[in-house]
Image (tube, grey):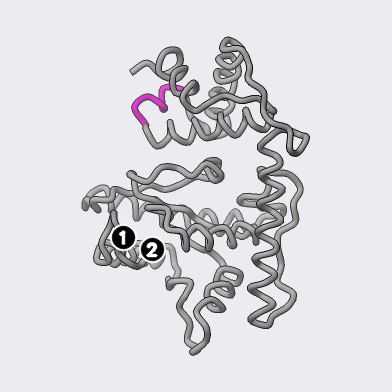
Amino acid sequence: MPISGNEECTTQHWDDVKRLLIEASETAGYSANLVSSSLDATIIQKNIVENLYNNEIIVCDVSTRNPNVMFELGMRLAFDKPVVIVKDELTPFTFDMGMIEHITYPRSLSYFQIEEFKRKLSDKIRNTVRESKKEGYSPFLKFFGGFEASTIKDRTEEGVLSEILLQISAINNKVNSMYVGTRPHVMPIEVPPQYAKDFIIKRIDEFCSRNGIKETDLYGNQPLRLRLVDFITVSSLNKGIAISPEFIDKVLDEVILPF
């Protein structure tokens, strides 16, 4: 999670958020620490990598899209180990991770909404750990094909950092190639508006089915709508066709989700 103040939130704000995350983790039965924490006086980057690799469960707050946090989340996802992602309601969903559930909290840290958020987070931590024990569990890589999770072989400080960077780069290249269809380096093609509209409607049905929701649950739910737009965009690119987010929004407003 972010720990220093930025243009959007103060250091005190992040301290308050950290306390909330710790309380929710303790309710779930865990003792929570930042991934940079260690009892040993070692280099902080080494602590981060080892904690990201070894800990049973990681909670990651991607609010304000802090670059260090996003990089650390990328490492955890490359390991394909269980992670719970949270964010405040003002931070947009990230394109590459729109398919993973995010638990949202109010940036204002309003008491009653925060109490509900902590309950959801505690339940999510317990459920995620339980699911991770099942054979074939994969929180992220399963969405992109049969990739094997990264492992750390060279346990020296330099070896760990070097290997992680190489593994993340390799996975990033594979995922990027999938976004433009089955053939790498083929640019998506424009399609007629009616075809694009029909494609969007089918993806809405698929999105609702995957998430166990009804179309009526999408009405007025902006975070869920953003996840839907990301899902449709990724689906279209994987099919080798180009449908802009603006056109998707237009279809949602005029045909599927009239407000």
Question: Which of the two residues, 23 or 228, is positioned nearer the viewer here?
Answer: 228
Tell whether label 1 touches label 2 (CB within 8 Å): yes
Element carrying mark 1 = loop
Question: In which quadrant will I find the C terminus?
Answer: top left
Q: Is residue 204 left or right of residue 173?
A: left
Write down the quadrant of residue 161 in the picture. Answer: bottom right
Q: Position of residue 89 (x, y in %)?
A: 34, 44
Residue at 55%, 15% (x, y): give it.
197
Residue 136 x, y percent position in the rendering: 71, 52
| Cα separation between marks 2 and 1 | 9 Å
Q: Is residue 75 depicted above or below 238 in this figure? A: below
Residue for point 40% across, 37% down: 223
Q: Is residue 14 above or below residue 93?
A: below
For disc 2, the marked residue is: 2
- Residue type (three-letter) at the residue carrying disc 2: Pro
Estimate how packed mark 2 is, as few (under 14), some (14 to 19) or many (20 or more) residues with alpha carbons within 10 Å.
many
Q: Which residues are magenta?
A: 215-221
* Rendered residue at 49%/21% (across/down): 247
- Which residue occupies the extreme top position in the image? 194
Classify 215 as above or below 13.
Answer: above
Q: Amino acid at mark 1?
A: Asn
In magenta segment, residue 104: no
Q: Which residue is mark 1?
A: 6
Total numbered labels: 2
